[in-house]
Amino acid sequence: MYFINPQEKFPPVSFADEDGLLAVTRDLSPDRLMEAYYKGIFPWYNEGQPVLWWSPDPRMVLFPENLKIAKSMRPYLNQDKFQVTFNQEFEKVIEACGNVNREGQDGTWITPEIKENYLKLHQEGIAVSTEVWEGSMLVGGLYGIYLKDKKVFCGESMFSKASNASKFGFIKLVQKLEKEGVKLIDCQIYTSHLESLGAEEIDRIEFLKFLI
């Protein structure tokens, strides 16, 4: 693990420890975030900590063509149970993601600093959101970084206030990204939920080839 000054670049991701922790900084800025995503690195830390930067190996990814839609989700999709919009309420989505109580997690990693800098990237069209609505109520959503020139989407966080709302939004987003020619969706680390949607682990070296 390396401490990086504001003027320094990240070390090679091969320097990350066995958990994927690569570096620590005091700064979090749009420029630092963009450097990170283009190198296969992402921030993940709790409020009160310095900024921790990760590049795990293996890497959890979803190839859009491998999306799995469970039978239980088909009635939701066939009946248009929810309505989905894109980039309409980014600030509300990231706020809701930060308020989710997650098992085994004390507090939130979506700090005010995270919100501020991702909002700046949203204003530049780089950080994007998916909103899931039930009538006029925002019941789910997710956000991430869209590296359009690389045809890669980096998922960050999602929330759900109604059963299957975030899964509904994720499916709609993946279908949209596939139509736009996206080759890979970065899911970062393994969860059984992501695996059920078709995501898989690949070697970090293979993942990084998509960012070249």
Image (cartoon, rainbow, N blue to C red):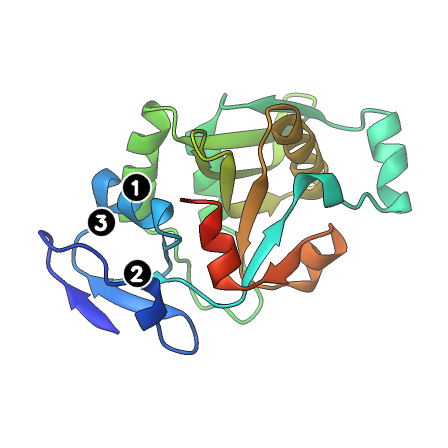
Q: Position of residue 20 (x, y in %)?
A: 41, 70
Q: Earlier in the sequence, mark 2 or mark 1?
A: 1
Q: In this rendering, does residue 141 appear at all?
A: yes
Report the side of 29 relative to 53 (left or right).
left
* Element class at badge 2: loop
Quarter of the image where one finds residue 14 = bottom left
Q: Earlier in the sequence, mark 3 or mark 1?
A: 3
Amino acid at the residue labelled 2: Glu
Q: Which residue is mark 1?
A: 34
Q: Which mark is residue 47?
A: 2
Amino acid at the residue labelled 3: Leu
What is the C-alpha distance between the residues marked 3 and 2? Answer: 13 Å
Amino acid at the residue labelled 1: Met
Residue drawn at (27%, 45%) of the image = 35
Q: In this rendering, does residue 164 appear at all?
A: no
Residue drawn at (66%, 39%) of the image = 170
Judged by depth in the image, the label closer to the viewer, 3 or 1, is: 1
